[in-house]
Structure formats: C-alpha cells, structure tokens
Amino acid sequence: MRHESTVYFPGEGKDFLQDCIMQSIEWCIHTQIKKVVIFSGTGAGAHFAATKILTQEGYSDLQLIAVTPPFGRPYRTNPADPGSPTVRTGIKQAMRDELAALGVAVVTAHLPFKGIHVGRERSGEWTPISEAYGVLGGGFALCVQAVLMACDAGCLESGERVVVASADTAFSAIACRTESFLSPTEGILVEHIICRPMQYRISKAKHSQLPRMWEQSGSNEQAANVIDPTPHITNETPNE
C-alpha cells in the first residue's frame, strides 16, 4: 500500500493558479515526470512556471506545454453569472513570442469535448462527457482535454506519463490522442489527483451555498489538506 496526498483548494479559479502549478511541478520532481501540460487562456500560468519555478536549481530539465482554446472565443469571467463581463480567450502574440523564447510549446486547438454549431444549435456527442467530468470541478475536464490536444499536436507521445494542470486542478496521467480517448487499451488514464477544488463556486454555484465538508464534519482545514490561496510570489497577479 502506498500513501500519497491530494491538496484541496477551498474554491475554484485563478486565485489558486500559482499554488496549483507549484504543486504540479513538485509532483514531477517527486515522480521524475519530465513534462507538464498547462491549460491556459492567456499564457500567464505557463509564463509563471517558466520564469518563477523552472529558473530555480533542480527544475530546469522540465518541459512545459501550454494548451489554449481557439483564439478569440468569448466566455464569461464567471460562468455562474450571466451578467459577468465577457472576455476572449487567446495567448497574444507578444506572450507567444516570450513563451517560445522560454522554450514553452504552445498548442491552440478546438477543445475535443466542445460542441460545434449546427445551424442555430450547438451540438456535440462528447459534450456530456465534459459535463460528467464536472462532478470533479470545472478544471478537471479542461485538464483531460489539454492532454488529448497536446498529444494530437505531437508534444506528447501516446502512452507517455505526464502532469497536467489548470488554474485549480492537477493530476498525473497516461496520455493518448483524442481518437483513442475511450480505448480500453490505449485510452487516457488518470493516475493521481495532485490537487483539486473542495468547493465548486464557479462551475456549480449552488455548491457554494452548502456548508463546507470540513466544517460540517467538525474537522479542520489542515487535516483535510486544504491550503490557503495566498500566492507564494507576491509581486505577480495571475490572469488565467
């Protein structure tokens, strides 16, 4: 029997980005995994990892891959609030150039689970899969898709062990191409959840109205491996 811990964040979103990435990279060092895939709307997460962590001794051998959705796709800053501001995805050219100079590969593609418009309706046979992954928080499905996209682009080999992170979720996985996603012999495998949200305040807003699990059980946050979202680096505000 082997005991490994999972870190729980008290919520979702970019407030936990830096801690999530640091936990991911520490897991790579712990398990000798060489590649980290970071799902990123703007490139800030990959830039933080490349400039603040991989520049330190002992981390320079890691390879970063930034995966981003199609450039210019609009989305709400808070999906739970229809009135929240609309922003557009995309790693701008200046950031792409900087990431390239830092040795970070950037993959931009349609998300495999995202439906496409057929007339006025958006449909996709894989959309329910994304919704099913949502029981583990909004970032989990993004991480799965990021691995598929990176493998499709040739940045990962099918069967390669990798760590993948979003703003608030990270896990180690065995990669595969999108076409093999559900294959019983070649499909993606999630091996260890490194960190994830404990409460889904963004993807499932009603969850924020319920008592926190550790409050209801009478346990304390430390016992539940819940960490504070305060960034370790105080002079940079992530914008994922």
Image (cartoon, grey):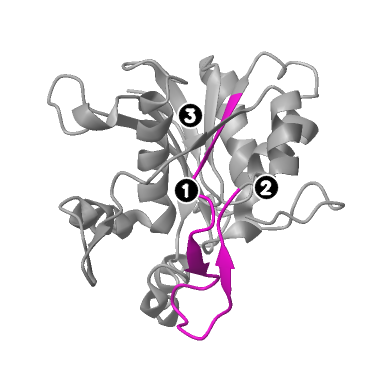
Answer above or below: position of 143 versus 77: above
The residue carrying pointer 1 sits among few (fewer than 14), some (14 to 19) or many (20 or more) residues within 10 Å by Cα, namely many
Q: Which residue is mark 2?
A: 92
Image quadrant assignment for residue 32 = top right
Instruction: Please tell me whether residue 25 belongs to the stretch shown in magenta.
Output: no
- Residue 69, which numbered label? 1
What's under tag 3, amino acid-wise?
Val
**Which residue is drawn at the image coordinates 87% and 52% (left, top)?**
235
Q: Magenta residues? A: 64-90
Instruction: Please tell me whether residue 85 belongs to the stretch shown in magenta.
Output: yes
Answer above or below: position of 51 versus 1: below
From the top left corner, tell me how far across and down residue 136 is, in percent: 34, 54
What's under tag 2, amino acid-wise?
Lys
Check if mark 2's residue and mark 3's residue have beta carbons within 8 Å. Answer: no
Q: CA distance from mark 3 to mark 1?
A: 19 Å
**Which residue is drawn at the image coordinates 77% and 47% (left, top)?**
232
**Which residue is drawn at the image coordinates 80% and 24% (left, top)?**
55
Is tag 2's residue or tag 1's residue first in the polypeptide sequence? 1
Q: Quadrant of the N terminus?
A: top left
Nearer mark to the viewer, of 3 and 1: 1
The residue carrying pointer 2 sits among few (fewer than 14), some (14 to 19) or many (20 or more) residues within 10 Å by Cα, namely few
- Residue 163, which numbered label? 3
Q: Residue furthest bottom?
A: 83
From the top left corner, tell me how far across and down residue 36 is, in percent: 54, 28
Q: CA distance from mark 2 to mark 1?
A: 12 Å
